[in-house]
Amino acid sequence: MKRTLIAGLISASMATGAMAAESVEVLHWWTAGGEAAALGVLKKDLESQGVSWNDMPVAGGGGEAAMTALRARVTSSNPPSAVQALGFDITDWAKQGVVADLNTLASKEGWDKVVPKALQNFSKFEGKWIAAPVNVHSTNWVWANKAVLEKAGVTTMPTSWDGFIAALDKVQKAGFIGLAHGGQAWQDATLFDGVVLATGGVDFYNKAFVQKDEAALKSPTMKKSFDRMAQLRSYVDKDFSNRDWNLASAMVIEGKAGFQIMGDWAKGEFLNAKKVPGKDFMCFRVPGTQGMVSFNSDQFLMFKVGAASQGAQMKLAKAIMNPNFQSAFNVVKGSVPARTDVSNAAFDDCGKKGMADLAEANAKGTLVGSMAHGHAVPASIKNGFYDVITQHFNGTMTSAGATMAMAEAVQ
Ligand code: GAL
């Protein structure tokens, strides 16, 4: 009798998974050096709590391939515990009714008080927390190799668009690549975030990209933005097509190129290469966008999983929102904490500037959601914008044609 009873108990508990070690499966696209280093902080954190980490990396900057892989997993009713997700993609998944409810944990830990409203707009759906935000990145940054600029006679960081073009010219004439860039739609759109902000300012950016106002999309300001993208196109090297973003960062790190316009995940590559801000490289806002921030937050969206896996999932959410983790992770990632109660003590000068810029933009109403990284419009429209921007950058569409096409992309 006894033996069968014990056998029965073991098989029953194995069935519910109570006996299995706690584990989380996490789908993400952090495959570059700096990103993997930052993710390592979270993995170690979970493993120190006895939760094993089942990694599901899907390479491809900007996360498009990751979202495709996620759709396949959800369609086969086998979602991962958590997924790196951006802005409106989170909202779109929430509408499918497949995401977990983090509300009990969130209210116990007071997330509402420390996470900026601009992030909560995406972390919550119908008033309930469904995602844990790990950071705030921003896209209107320029990264520059200090030695290259000095050799080219660029002694001050440009603050105006014409000053930036003049600096790019000097770098190119000195024999370096002016602008390191990867010719992928999401990267072209990342440049466009900053160019539209520099050309039309925050109100125009919101009118065009958030309100999708037809007049704004078809305006002379939008056309001028495309003209400026054509200017940037003349400073990239001939092999830019389909280059991954981190390889473009490497061109600046290694002194082959003077500048890269990229989100501050690029700083993670500079740090991973042991470069020091102010000594080896400079970080400054896309000229003409000082005081403005186009942000995107990486949030871990939690999916509905079986009862046996929920404990580990909550441990993951709690670990992500831990203030100490938020400092340790973001120092490496190049982003700033998602929580407003984290000290900037551990951050370098670029990180401190990022935190100050975010606080200032939040207070002044000059914080906008990055169109390129899913924080202005849903993917269905974002991808329409991508197509126009990348065709124009590759020279198959004029600025006038692209301006008309932006309005059509919204239809
Ligand atoms: C962004 C994401 C960053 C980084 C970047 C490059 O969308 O927020 O964390 O992954 O893409 O892939």
Image (spheres, rainbow, N blue to C red):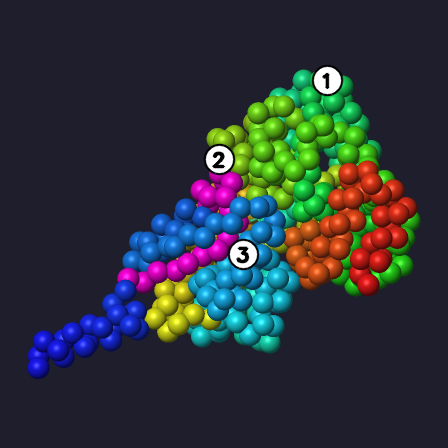
Q: Is residue 396 magenta?
A: no
Part of the protein shown in magenta: 21-38
**SS for tag 2?**
helix
Name the kind of residue labelled 3 in the image: Ala
**Is the residue marked by circle 1 packed among few (<14), some (14-19), or many (20+) residues within 10 Å?**
some
**Is the residue marked by circle 2 packed among few (<14), some (14-19), or many (20+) residues within 10 Å?**
some
**SS for tag 1?**
loop
The residue to which callout 2 is attached is: 272
**Is the residue marked by circle 3 packed among few (<14), some (14-19), or many (20+) residues within 10 Å?**
some
The residue to which callout 3 is attached is: 69
Name the kind of residue labelled 2 in the image: Asn
Which is more toward the observer, 379 or 15?
Answer: 15
**SS for tag 3?**
helix
| Rendering coords of residue 302 (x, y %) | 48, 65
> Which residue sits at x=65%, y=53%?
373
Q: Say which of marks 1 and 3 sits in front.
A: 3
Location of residue 153 by image quarter = top right
Residue 359 visible (yes or no): no
Q: CA distance from mark 2 to mark 1?
A: 28 Å
Q: CA distance from mark 1 to mark 3?
A: 44 Å
The residue to which callout 1 is attached is: 174
Residue 51 relative to residue 132: left or right = left
Question: Is residue 281 shown above or below 76?
Answer: above
| Rendering coords of residue 155 (x, y %) | 70, 24
Q: CA distance from mark 3 to mark 2?
A: 28 Å
